[in-house]
Structure formats: C-alpha cells, structure tokens
Amino acid sequence: MRRTGVAVIGCGAISKLHFDSIVNTPDTELIYAVDINEKRAKDAASAYGCGFHTDYREVLNDPAVHAVHLCTPHYLHCQMALDAMEKGKHVLTEKPMAISPEDAERMIRKSEETGLTLGVCFQNRYNATSVKIREALDSGRAGSILGAKASVTWNRDEGYYKADSWRGTWEMEGGGVLINQAIHTLDLLQWFAGDAVSVRGSCFKSLLENVIEVEDSAQAIIKFDSGVNALFQATNCYCVNSPVSIEIICTNATINLDGSLTIRYNDGKTECFTDDNPITGEKSYWGYSHKLLIQDFYDCIHTGRKFTLDGHEGIKALKIVKAIYKSSDTGQWVTLS
C-alpha cells in the first residue's frame, strides 16, 4: 500500500491536533505545513519534520500530496476544498465545512463528481461517551427519546477575538458562538435525536457587544423528524470553559452527559462512563478524538470504506446554525430544507 502524502493548510491553534494525529496514523506521511504566515509554516515544519510552503495552490500541484487538511479561517474552507478536489486531493476540513449551506453543497457536489473523500471534523462523535449514548439509543435499552436539552457555556474574551482579524465577523467567521464553538454540540444533538426539521431561536451580544459584530450568546428550540423537541443554549460569556452538558429523556432511561456520562434506567440500574482525555493545556476541552477521526478518515481512504462524517453529515449542523440565525432575524419558526 502506498503511503498517503498529507499537507496541513493553516498552522493556527487547531492544527497541532492535526499534525500530532497525522504523524501517528499508519500509512500516512506528512509532506507540508502550509500557512501564509511564513514563520508559522516554518515553525510547524521544524516541529514535525516536514516541508513548508506559504502558497497552498503550489502544494496542490505536488503529486506527492494526496490529501489536505483545512485548518484555515471558515471563509476559506469552500474555495480551498474545491481547489484541492479539482487537483485530485482528498479533503478533511475543520468545522464548519463552509460559511453557508450553499457553499457546503458545492463541496459535496465536487466530492461526488470526483469520487474523492470529503470529511468534516466533528470529532466529538468519536468520544467514548458519545459512542455509549448512541449504543444505548440504538440498542433500544433506553427506549424512545421524549425530549432533550444541551448547553455550552464557554469563555472567549476580547483578546481571543483581537488575536485574529477574521474572528467575530459575519463575512469571515460566518457568526459567533453558534458556528464556531456550539456547532459541535448541535452536531451531537442531531446525531442522537434525528434530523432537525424546524427551529426557533434568538442570538444576541452581551459582554462582547463592543468587541464583535456577531453573537456571543444564543438559545433555540429545535424540532426533529423523530417528533422530539430539544432546548439548546450557548454562550461565550462564562468565566471558564465548562464541559458540554446534554440531557436526553427516554421512555426507559435518563441520559446525562456533563463531562462524564450517566445513564439511569427506570428499573433502577445505573451506568457511568468517563472519557479518558490525555490532552492537557488551554484547549483540553476540545477532547482527544481528533486522532480517532483522522485515523478513521485515512483507514477509509486506504480500504475504500465510506467515511461516515462526509459532507452530507457535516452540512446538517451548519443548516441548524443558519436556521437559528434566520429565526433570530425574523422572530419566526424556520423550516430546514
């Protein structure tokens, strides 16, 4: 089996998880670290023993590169993905896969036209606790879902937004807490409860009203095709980055995820699970599952197996985010296409 040559485009904060995962993935070879900031690219290349470049288009012309990871600002994902697939490269993009569902659809079509793998980093689906929740729901042990709620209370201060000019803008970030931080939890919520069909929500600025043009807080009610209604809230205005909280009420059990997972069955039995998270430091709450997702992505490329978190899956949470924004603007229920 030939080794899959990989380039990471964008060497900011999230890229370290990608670099670490790639060099520990069988049958892959890190070829380039790419960033328009030459120092960032050089530093990453030095740390991981690969080449560097400042122009991603030049990297796409290298036949040694078979796949690219997009760790760039949100507004760049779509065009970079299209360019990469046009050159015959598989693409794994950080969330959100695009700023708009229309751009995401363009990426999906290009993947289908070329037969190349397009993956989206919703790595929390690979968390041990997330897998246990799906098992409890799929097995029927928990029964049918009656309702759910989810909460994201994190911290992003003025310094975070001023560190990079694209953050906190509609044009380049595409929104605030919903599209950047809480989209992971929205993805989990719809993965557990079913496809979202309509939402009603509101978004607003509170502590960061003089810093950003997008929302720092939001809340919504989400209706799913399963008949389930879910309550959702998110904010970047808390003092710390708390564990994401998800509660699912079922006919036979109550499922609570709050860092650790507890499943209390109506017959009195209780199951408890924790995620072993070896990641430490400022971004430890991101979890450890990038490695699991990335290894699965390449296993699918090597074996021809379909990658589960493809564009069709990746677009679902983005559509929920955009529907909440529209509902906030109109004050009405919004139906998802």
Image (cartoon, rainbow, N blue to C red):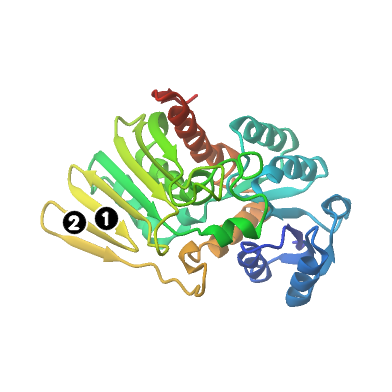
Amino acid bearing label 2: Arg
Residue 207, x across and y down, in percent = 44, 52
- Name the foreground residue: 218 vs 125: 218
What residue is at 26 percent from the left and 65 percent from the top?
272
- Name the foreground residue: 231 vs 170: 170
**Residue receiving disc 2:** 264
Residue 288 drawn above or below residue 107: below
Sequence-wise first label, 1 or 2: 1
What residue is at 40 percent from the left and 62 percent from the top?
128
Residue 308, x across and y down, in percent = 54, 46
- Name the foreground residue: 270 vs 166: 166
What residue is at 54 percent from the left and 42 percent from the top?
214
State the residue lying farthest toward the front: 210
**Whether label 1 touches label 2, CB < 8 Å:** yes
Residue 200, x across and y down, in percent = 38, 30
Q: Quadrant of residue 221?
A: top left
Task: Identify the element where label 1 is drawn.
Answer: strand
Residue 265 drawn above or below residue 330: below
**Residue receiving disc 1:** 256
